[in-house]
Image (cartoon, rainbow, N blue to C red):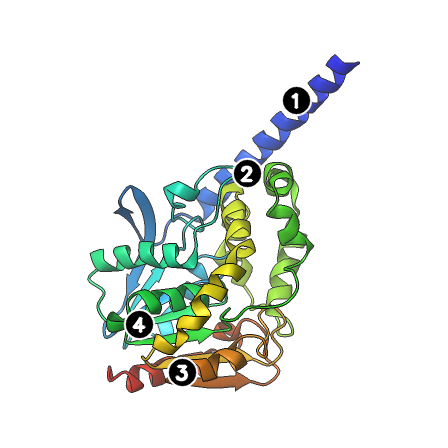
Amino acid sequence: MLLILTLVALGLVIVVHWRASAREAAANAAYPPIGELIDIDGVKVHAKVQGSGPDLVLIHGASGNMRDFTFDMVDQLSDRYRVILFDRPGLGWTDNLPQHAGAWNATAATPHEQAALLQKAADQLGVSNPIVLGHSYGGAVALAWGLSRPDDTAALVLVSAVSEPWEGDLGWQYKITGSAFGSGIVIPLVTAFVPQGFVRASVDAIFAPQATPDGYSDHIGTGLSLRRMSMRANAQQVNTLLPEIKKMVPKYDTLTMPVELIHGTADTIVPLDVHAAIATPQLPDAVLTTLPGIGHMPQHVTQPDVIAVIDRAATRAGLR
């Protein structure tokens, strides 16, 4: 009996691994790199440069990749900015940092470590005194960027950004996927079998209360986010973000460059009153724009407002 159960378990493991690998291969083939792959001390960083003008770095949020910005936003900016996009470590086509790569027991790349890697890639691209925009989790990386290079960061733009400590947990999904059991067992099952209907519903929840733009899910390549490596990296990063934010907050008064914050009042993922509303008075030269009734994705649903705060940041920094 034990032998039969062992063989059944082994068969299930083989099926899950085969199906997960097949879905990952299909996602990689459907959504190849759209920029260049830069070698940074043996770590592959996916970067894309478009346009000309002052340097503008865009950093995406959790579970995402640079395609979030290439859906239609970059085309609205590249006529007057040199836009530089990166996939964050472990997501899209950027490798995880070696000390954090691995399977179920890997640790998370902190916002400061992520910023340091992307800064080295930016240096190779000749980026100088950039405006750095971060959305959601990417806002924490943008803040870390500014803290580590205060004299070479023209301005920060924080879009629906995580910036402050919060109460409570992150929900059962992150609790499970961030555990050893979830990383080793649940994530491969999700990669192998999660239906597309569930994925699209998850994207819709991120955009709520607004609708997901037509074609967005297909453009961003949700299959890239469902790869085992990416799911593990994302879960680890999100689950360990709170203590990193707590370390950064006391240093916000050193961020003397212009900072623009833009946040929707209906954002339930990164609530305005927990993050931007508290962070604004802690930053010496910050301006907060609130968007009534807008959720977590203003870079798509109220894009002109986001572009306006980018332009204002450039003006305040003396770049326009």
User: What element does badge 2 sit on?
Assistant: loop
Quarter of the image for residue 2 reads top right
Q: Comparing marks 3 and 4, which lies closer to the viewer?
A: 3
Nearest to N terminus: mark 1 or mark 2: 1
The Cα–Cα distance between marks 1 and 2, rounded to whole angstroms, is 18 Å
**Residue 107 image point, x, y percent:** 48, 45
Nearest to N terminus: mark 2 or mark 4: 4
How packed is label 1: few (under 14 Cα within 10 Å), some, or many (20 or more)? few
The Cα–Cα distance between marks 1 and 4, rounded to whole angstroms, is 52 Å
The amino acid beneath tag 3 is Val
Instruction: Please name whichever residue, 256 or 228, is drawn nearer the observer in this view of the structure.
Output: 256
Compared with 113, 300 (above or below) is below
Residue behind mark 1: 10
The Cα–Cα distance between marks 1 and 3, rounded to whole angstroms, is 55 Å
The N terminus lies in quadrant: top right
Residue 203 in view here: yes
Residue behind mark 4: 78
The amino acid beneath tag 4 is Ser
Residue behind mark 2: 104
